[in-house]
Image (cartoon, helix red, strand yellow):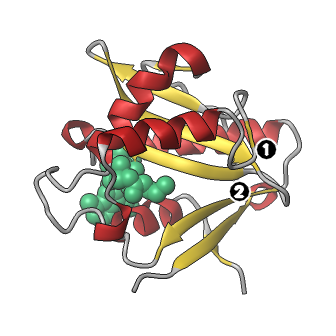
Amino acid sequence: MSETLRLTATLSALNLRLEPLDGARPVDPPNDLFRLGELLLDAYHAASGDPKSVPADEQVAGADALEAVDGLLSGTYGTFDAEASELVEREGRVVTATLVTTPEGGPLVAIAMTHPTWQRRGLAGASVARAMARLAGRGETSVDALVTDDNERALALFRSLGFAERP
Ligand SMILES: CC(C)(COP(=O)(O)OP(=O)(O)OC[C@H]1O[C@@H](n2cnc3c(N)ncnc32)[C@H](O)[C@@H]1OP(=O)(O)O)[C@@H](O)C(=O)NCCC(=O)NCCS
C-alpha cells in the first residue's frame, strides 16, 4: 500500500529565474481540457514502455483522466492557478504540463506530467522550475507537491528541484 508524501520547496531559499522554455504557454482551460486529459492518460498509463513506471493505483482510464483534469481546472482541488501553470507544446501536441492549484495552505503542484515519448529530456524539470519562479516572483514563500512514495521518477524530479519532506 503506497503512502502519499507531501514535499515542500522553500522558494525563498532557491535561486529561481524564469528560464525560457521552447513551446511553453499558459493553459487555456476550456480549450486545453481535452489535450490535457489526453496527456494525463498517456503520462499515467502503464503502457508507457515500463509497466512499473506508474504505480498501479495511480493509473487512470480515459474518462477518469478527463474528469480529473476538468476537476482540477474548475477548482475541485483548490483554485486553479492559471498564472503559475503552463503547458509545453512540441511538434503540434501538448507534451508536458505543470498544473498548480491553491488549496488552503498555499500553492501546490497538483500535476506535473510529460508524454512518455518526451520523458527524460528535462521538460518537466524545466516547466516545474518555471512555475516555481513565477510563484516566487509574486511573493509566494513555498510550494508543495503530493507524491506517492513508490513513484520514484516523480520523487526524483521534485527532489532535484529542491523539494523535500517537511521535518
Ligand atoms: C515524473 C515525470 C513528470 C518526469 O517528467 P520528465 O519530463 O521525464 O522529467 P525530466 O526529464 O525533466 O527529469 C527531471 C528529473 O526528474 C528525475 N527523473 C525523471 N524521470 C526519471 C526516471 N525515469 N528515473 C529516475 N529519475 C527520473 C531526474 O532527477 C531528472 O533529472 P536528470 O534527468 O537530470 O537526472 C514523468 O515521468 C511523468 O509524467 N510521470 C507520470 C506522471 C507523474 O507521476 N507525475 C508526478 C506526480 S504529479
Indicate if the residue with disc 1 has its beta carbon within 8 Å of ligand 1: no
Quadrant observed for ligand 1 in the rendered image: bottom left
Q: Are marks 2 and 1 in contact (CB under 8 Å)?
A: yes
Q: Looking at the picture, how far across and down is residue 102, in whole percent?
A: 77, 47
Q: Looking at the picture, how far across and down is residue 6, in whole percent?
A: 63, 72
* Quarter occupied by residue 163: bottom right
Q: Amino acid at mark 1?
A: Ala
Q: Amino acid at mark 2?
A: Leu
Q: Residue lying furthest right in this view? A: 139
Residue drawn at x 16%, y 50% is 48
Quadrant including the C terminus: bottom right
Residue drawn at x 42%, y 62% is 154
Horizontal placement of 11 versus 92: left or right?
Answer: right
Taking 103 as reference, is 101 above or below it? Answer: above
Using the rendered image of the protein, determine whether residue 93 is visible from the camera's viewpoint: yes
**Closer to the camera in the image, 46 or 25:** 46
Task: Find disc 1 in the rendering and name its residue.
Answer: 136
